[in-house]
Image: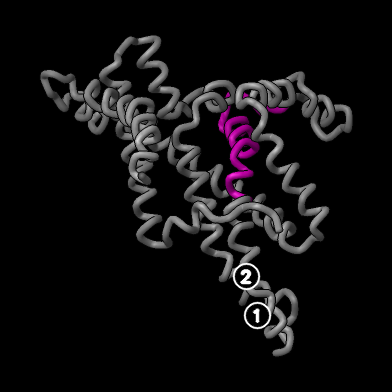
């Protein structure tokens, strides 16, 4: 009976998840006449390799920013009262209810040369001319960090809330200062949450399209933007499918490595507030 109840889910995943992935893979191999030509182009063309390098650098930079910004937030969630914790969680989760496109356009209004941020800085006398905050890596970092920050905070909070507070009390009894207790007890115990958040954010950042396409520009093209151009502008579906397949395989590789090192339970922990 349990197996029969799972069949609708299995069929749904096969039709809407597995079939599209297989179709993309076959397209990249020129099925029904298999060829690895597109993959040879990807790994031999300096332009393609530079795009992969840009994507990984951007994803890594955004991951580091989210870690430094998200850790204090996750730490605060563990040390405030239930009512304030619930309010903070709502503030963290609320942006997820807004479309990526809407949030990106909102940042375009804020970051453009005549936007709110530049106007405030100029009115305050801090700058004499507008800063270039868009169509470069700065705009990409700002937009992606805003979108992905909740995905860093939640895994860290999931681990931090399960740290035994008795260990911190024991450190205090041994005459450790609050800073020493944090550095030598709390921080090491929270490292699995940091690792989970970093892997989660990095994997999501690898496939970002809307934010880099609208806020980025110049030489900082990413894999997702390249796939869109190959598919819609150059109509090279084979190369676009190959790029998508390589991106998927890289994401799966990171997923497997994390599972082997720390375990998936750290990545998909219990996020609800107490």
**Residue projecting furthest to the left:** 33
Q: Name the residue nearer the viewer: 130 or 253.
A: 253
Which residue is at 40% across, 22% downward? 226
Residue 163: mark in rendering = 2
Q: In this view, does 81 lie to the left or right of 157?
A: right
**Residue identified by numbered label 1:** 167
Up the image or down, 137 lies above or below 78; here it is above
Residue 75 in the image, given as x and y percentages of width and height: 70, 60
Which residue is at 64% across, 35% downward? 96
Colouring of the image: one colour
Q: Secondary structure of the magenta portion, mostly?
A: helix
Q: In this view, does 121 lie to the left or right of 258?
A: right
Does dot 2 land on a helix, a strand or a loop? loop
- From this viewpoint, is residue 48 visible? no
Question: For the C terminus, which image quadrant?
Answer: bottom right
Which residue is at 66% across, 21% downward? 105
Q: Is residue 217 magenta?
A: no
Q: Does the magenta stretch include residue 141?
A: yes
Residue 148 in the image, given as x and y percentages of width and height: 59, 40
Residue 182: mark in rendering = none
Pointers 2 and 1 in contact (C-beta within 8 Å): yes
Determine the image quadrant of residue 120. Answer: top right
**Residue projecting furthest to the bottom:** 174
Magenta residues, start to end: 131-153
Q: In this view, does 121 lie to the left or right of 92?
A: right
**Residue projecting furthest to the front:** 1
């Amino acid at each position: 009976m349990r197996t029969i109840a799972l069949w609708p889910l299995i069929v749904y995943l096969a039709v809407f998840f597995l079939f599209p992935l297989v179709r993309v893979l076959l397209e990249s191999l020129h099925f029904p006449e298999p060829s690895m030509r597109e993959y040879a182009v990807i790994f031999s063309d300096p332009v393609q390799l530079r795009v992969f390098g840009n994507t990984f650098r951007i994803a890594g930079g955004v991951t580091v920013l989210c870690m430094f910004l998200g850790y204090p937030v996750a730490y605060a969630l563990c040390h405030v009262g239930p009512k304030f914790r619930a309010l903070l969680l709502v503030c963290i989760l609320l942006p997820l209810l807004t479309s990526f496109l809407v949030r990106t356009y909102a940042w375009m209004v804020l970051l453009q040369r005549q936007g709110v941020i530049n106007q405030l800085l100029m009115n305050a006398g801090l700058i004499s001319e507008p800063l270039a905050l868009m169509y470069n890596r700065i705009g990409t970092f700002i937009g992606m960090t805003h979108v992905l920050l909740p995905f860093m905070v939640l895994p860290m909070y999931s681990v931090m809330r399960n740290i035994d507070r008795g260990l911190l009390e024991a450190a205090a009894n041994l005459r450790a200062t609050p800073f020493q207790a944090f550095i030598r007890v709390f921080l090491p115990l929270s490292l699995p949450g940091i690792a989970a958040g970093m892997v989660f954010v990095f994997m999501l950042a690898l496939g970002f399209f809307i934010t880099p396409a609208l806020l980025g520009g110049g030489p900082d093209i990413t894999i997702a933007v390249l796939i869109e151009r190959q598919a819609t502008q150059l109509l090279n579906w084979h190369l676009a499918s190959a790029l998508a397949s390589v991106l998927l395989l890289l994401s799966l590789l990171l997923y497997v490595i994390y599972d082997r090192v720390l375990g998936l339970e750290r990545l998909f922990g219990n996020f609800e507030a107490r």
